[in-house]
Amino acid sequence: MKIIVGLSGGVDSSVATLLLLEQGYEVEALFMKNWEEDDTDGVCTAEQDLSDAQKVADKLGVKLHTINFSADYWDDVFDHFLKEHKKGRTPNPDVLCNQKIKFKVFLEHAISLGADKIATGHYARIHEDNGIYQLQTGLDNNKDQSYFLHLLNQNQLSKSLFPLGEINKDEVRRIATENGFVTADKKDSTGICFIGERNFSEFLQTYLPKQQGDIVDQDGQFIKHHEGLAFYTMGQRKGLEIGGGFSNSGEPWFVADKRIDSNELVVVQGDHVLLYHHNLNASDPHWIGNPPILPLACTAKIRYRQQSQLCLVHPTDNGQLKVTFDQPQRAITPGQSIVFYDDDICLGGAIIENRN
């Protein structure tokens, strides 16, 4: 069986490639460039990543293909990313990138190159049960990436492999070191590649216009001006730049709400009750296997690496889902994904619309 692995120039995909070879597959690799406007300030290192990927491929004797998916990424991921932020929402481009790029255009391109399946360095597992493919959490709880993969469908899962699903990150680093990979000690990429370590608000301001409004407390008292609701997210602490003089408590300030109609950003101090909600409504539900019978008692995550939370999922008259949590959840964020689980099986997810 011929496998084409997405080789990113990081340690995870490097070890995934080695494991596939050890399992006896015919292996080739592919380096994807998904962002054109990089390397201008040394933040996104596509050139270095390609160099590292080539070194790993050469060491393993694997052919490395390169492809530029930047146009697809802009049309299918980044354009949506900007439109959501314009609405004051906080989208998750990594979720959409997996659905639209890594497991769609990459998959299609790999098959055109003769691949039977593709593989990536994601920490997740795939299990087939009576012809239905299930997405399972990775055994390394600290690295499990099923949250980002919840939009995959049966066809995509049937043609994918996750070699790292059964091992943990420490083991991956050890394997990379033992095999002398240049990526062995390479720092993991964090956040969205095209943003990297840049200031997120400053990055967005290069694409979105400023729309100044008021920052107010829970009582409506004016604190200062903001430059646009698009540049803030629920629960945010850093970047508010609210100094002393607005209260005597000394506790940090957090974003509790974004009032789109009045262009107001509501902030509160400390672990305030306004940061917590029991319920949310979510749209565009996607189920990986057969749709479950609703109402459904399960667990869910409203952000990556969150501990799964007990909840009850109800259908609504407009096709959305109403989710009620056993315990109130902090900083539920419209535009983000809620992902549902039955033990270690990822059932699917939906887009958070509002909370109450």
Image (spheres, rainbow, N blue to C red):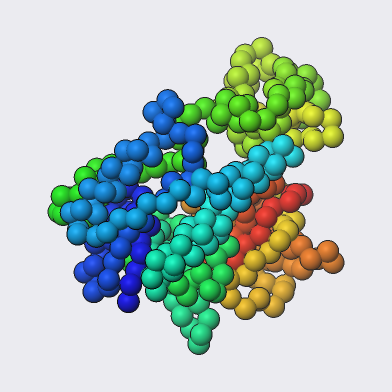
- 140 relative to 108 in the view: left or right: left
Q: Is residue 288 above or below residue 55?
A: below
Q: Is residue 79 above or below residue 258?
A: below
For residue 249, say whether it is visible.
Answer: yes
- 243 relative to 213 in the view: left or right: left
Q: Nearer the viewer, residue 337 or 343?
A: 337
* Image coords of residue 64 (percent x, y): 30, 55
Position of the N terminus by quadrant: bottom left
Determine the residue positioned at 67% across, 55% down: 351
* Image coords of residue 75 (percent x, y): 62, 48
Determine the residue positioned at 32% across, 48% down: 10
For residue 168, say whether it is visible.
Answer: no
- Can you tell which quarter of the image residue 218 is in? top right
* Image coords of residue 152 (percent x, y): 55, 65
Q: Nearer the viewer, residue 335 or 6?
A: 6
Determine the residue positioned at 72% across, 72% down: 295
The residue most toward the top is 245
Determine the residue positioned at 35% across, 61% down: 5
* Image coords of residue 71 (percent x, y): 55, 46
- Can you tell which quarter of the image residue 282 is in? bottom right
- 226 relative to 337 in the view: left or right: right
Q: Is residue 330 above or below residue 112?
A: above
The residue most toward the bottom is 130
Q: Nearer the viewer, residue 254 or 83?
A: 83
Total tally of numbered discs in the picture: 0
